[in-house]
Image (cartoon, coloured by chain):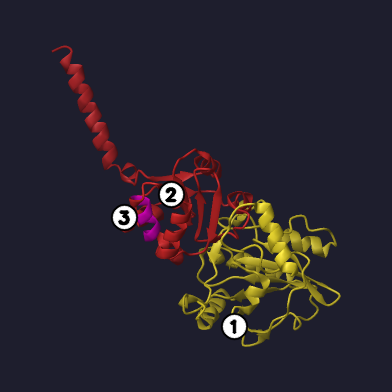
Chain colours: A yellow, B red
Amino acid sequence: MKNFIIIVLIFGFIGSHSYNFAQIQGYQIGDQAMDFKLPSVSGDQVSLSGLENAKGAIVIFTCNTCPYAKAYENRIIELHEEYSPRGYPVIAINSNDDQISPGDSFEAMKVRASEKDFPFDYAYDKDQKVIKAYGGMRTPHVYLLNKEENKFVVSYIGAIDNNYQDPNSVSEAYVENAVEALLQNKNIETKTTKAIGCGIKWTKETD
Amino acid sequence: MLLKTPLLTGIFVCLILILGFNLSPHQAADPNFKIISFEEFEKLKSKESNKLRVYNFWATWCAPCVKEMPYFEAIGQNDASVELVFISLDDGRKPGRVTTFLEKENIKSPVYLLNDVDYNQWIDKINPNWSGAIPATLFVQPSGENHFHEGELDESELEALINKLKP
């Protein structure tokens, strides 16, 4: 019922026809993020509750094949190296259907992780349940979670920064700024952003 | 004779210029291809038109975009009440990837490469419901009313949408 009212309100505000619910589904800032248990390329299962001594997590829906995701690989590694020791590790999740995008299979993920020597968990959300709950729509799509009284609260949703082409030309490092704010107990100034990205390769529903 | 010589010279110079331009690889590229800023896109979009304008956001590397492209191209070429523009989100530093693709796929509709990677500044201005994933398509009716679709369209879905929206 609550969701229905929200949808009606949003449609009222936009005041025009729309054919999808891209920004209406999934988590909003302040929501409690669900835990998950997904197989990582390391052979372990990765979950939020399994993070030891973490203050939160940088959950990034990404993949092997998208040019934007590839452009951000090194920056994702840097985020993990900077913030994992300070309590915010990266958990990278690939949710693409490997029938539609064979380059995103679990085997291909293992190959990519080893080529790039990913220092973070890279997990496969094969049934797409996690990305659907979170509301991820494209790669890369970041959900920064902050642990508050044992709950993982969504604190930032969006892009990594504002220039995929060139890390040296970035003028707003959204994720970095958000994690720094959390670490300094300050308000996150920019809580949501958008970026062009590759659409998730959704599994076709069989009726 | 005195009058004729400069005229002939003029024609000759013109011919050389035209041929010269046609021979140079840059000018030989698709005249329907242009690199634009977001401001230029907004100008384009706000122009008045009595047609249904369709802006399809795509990129050469995006498989679902490439798949739906022929459906859009066919409507753009065959339906006089529709004005189709492909908006490429390819890397603006490498426009050759786009022009080569257009030639190979025989795309005749206008194609503009929107060269602005500060995406958060403009995605909501196109439509607040857009997550930023491509393919995505914006339909602008002659009344100025906007309709937006995120995700791939198959041929029948696109036709149904066009028939519903066109004047």
Q: Residue A50's image quarter?
A: bottom right
At which x and y percent is residue B150?
A: 54, 61
Chain label for disc 3? B
Occupied quadrant, residue B1: top left
Q: Which disc is residue A41 wearing?
A: 1
State the count of labels.
3
- In the image, taking residue B28 as reference, residue A34 lies left or right, namely right
State which tag comes first along the sequence, 3 or 2. 2
Which residue is found at the position 75% from the left and 61% from the top?
A178
Q: What stretch is highlighted in magenta?
A: B70-77
Q: Mark 2 points at which residue?
A: B85
User: Of the residues shown, which amino acid type is indicated by label 2?
Assistant: Val
Query: Mark 1: which amino acid?
Result: Val
* Labels 3, 2: one chain: yes
> How far apart, in angstroms, are the residues tagged by discs 1 and 2?
42 Å
- Specify the subunit that label 1 lies on: A
| Residue sitting nearer the eye, B167 or B20 | B167
Which residue does the image show at 24% across and 37% down from the upper left? B19
Coordinates of residue B114 in the picture (x, y in percent): 50, 49
* Element class at badge 1: loop
What secondary structure is found at the residue carrying circle 3?
loop
